Amino acid sequence: MTDSANPESTAFTSALDVVATVEPRIADAIRQELTDQRESLKLIASENYASPAVLAAMGNWLSDKYAEGTVGRRFYAGCRNVDTVESIAAEHARELFGAPHAYVQPHSGIDANLVAFWAILAHRVEAPALAKAQAKHVNDLSEADWEQLRQELGNQRALGMSLDAGGHLTHGFRPNISGKMFEQRSYGVDPATGLVDYAALRELAREFRPLVIVAGYSAYPRLINFATMRDIADEVGATLMVDMAHFAGLVAGKVLTGDYDPVPHAQIVTTTTHKSLRGPRGGLVLCQEELASEVDRGCPMVLGGPLSHVMAAKAVALAEARQPGFQQYARQIVDNSRALADGLQRRGATIVTGGTDNHLVLLDVGGYGVTGRQAENALLDSGVVTNRNSIPKDPNGAWYTSGIRLGTPALTSRGLGVAEMDEVADLIHTVLSQTSPAATADGGASKAKHRLDDAVASKVAARAAELMAAHPLYPQVDLSASA
Ligand code: PLP
């Protein structure tokens, strides 16, 4: 099809031509990014490809508008179109996930978690202190009462999944602000099975008595029982917060239901919108009514002014996720993930927990005699984009690691199915079985540098490129039509 016969392509290529009139190097980088994405076999579990409609909703003049506040209660004039956008996005989020309240302003997953933590602190610590002092607002407190409240806010506890079990930095770890806000403890997984040990978690919660229990992960390949998590939280008087950033697409697509759907069980749920949910980069908070007014104070509490253009793109992505095809997509993500794990196992690879129930596979590369870092680089040399990840009790630590995290949301968006996953498993196994550590200057084995025959890497890269060419990305966009 020629570009002139294809309005979607014309829209994108014309936009690039406009960019090029001001800064051609940026237009070139954008074009190159599409070319790179088209050619690479993307197995990064946290990435996806947003639809042309989502991308178009993001690149426009909504970006110019300031809209601090919430729908109908803005600190700026002239927000009627932003009100429309934000209320449609929130309505889609509520309907899609069956949540009483949705807040669509967070700029990212980290921001959504910050909003959630502060909403919980405001509800559980600040509101009772204000009531006790018979004050309506923090500005009404005396200096002494305010100082006491500040100390109390800073003296709370959170319990989250450990990093090497698949938890996320924002769940109370020191390098992130959450670790500076809360005294934190972590729950891990059973060393024998690699699965969450709910009995051990309950014991830890009884002893530690956290204000918040955080469930959710970035590298745990199994299901979490949120009904059990809520039961534990209730027993110790904690608020259950679930970060479903990674698996929101599986919740939206009704793959995770009943005890495995966090929304009916947690008081507050956060997510990103750009991973398995396939929307624009951004965040979202869902909550029960009791936390709604505190959540809505996210901006200016911890967020800058809302990104109206991104809220528009979230609305489009959420509308897409409400269409029946999305449920088929979500099921295919998990089928593909299982097929990938099976394909690797049949070739002798070790999979953490022995398989997967979600969108990701955690490959223990120790059996190939390399570190996660070496595996990641060897695969990258061969046109396969993955990322290294710790495995439980990782002997190589968080920098070199012993794992590779593989995710199927992006390849599933490109239309790859179970049969192709076997080919992908073969590419990964071919590379890793021929990769070895490079020698260090003193003759030891490097943890960072690897050795892989160029011919092997080129052959695998050619096979990966062929697979990608058979499943074109944004086929409606004809870059040759742009200058
Ligand atoms: N929460 C989890 C579980 C994640 O995996 C991530 C990102 O990888 C985040 C939060 C942070 O998301 P963002 O990068 O959008 O801030």
Image (cartoon, grey):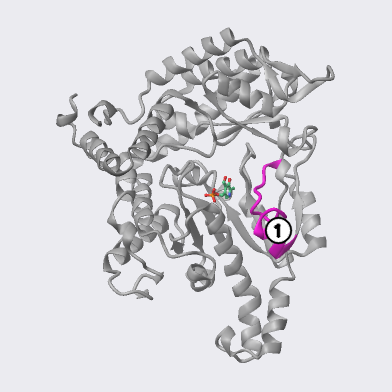
> Is the residue indicated by label 1 positioned so its CB lies within 8 Å of ligand 1?
no
**Residue 369 figure quarter:** top right
Residue 53, x across and y down, in percent: 30, 43
- Residue under the point 72% across and 82% down: 148
196 displayed left or right of 221 = right
Residue 478, x across and y down, in percent: 26, 28
80 displayed left or right of 337 = left
Q: Is residue 174 magenta?
A: yes
Q: Where is the C terminus found, in terms of image quarters?
A: top left
In this rendering, is residue 252 above or below 237? above
Residue 125, x across and y down, in percent: 66, 76
Q: How many marks?
A: 1
In this rendering, is residue 27 above or below 447? below
Q: Where is the N terminus found, in terms of image quarters?
A: top left
- Residue under the point 34% across and 44% down: 55
Residue 267 seen in the figure:
no
Within-10-Å neighbours for mark 1: few <14, some 14–19, many 20+: some
Q: Nearer the viewer, residue 447 or 261?
A: 447
55 displayed left or right of 293 = left
Residue denoted by label 1: 179
- Label 1 is placed on what type of residue? Gly
Residue 174, x across and y down, in percent: 72, 55
Give the secondary structure at mark 1.
helix
**Residue 6 figure quarter:** top left
The magenta stretch spans which residues?
Answer: 165-183
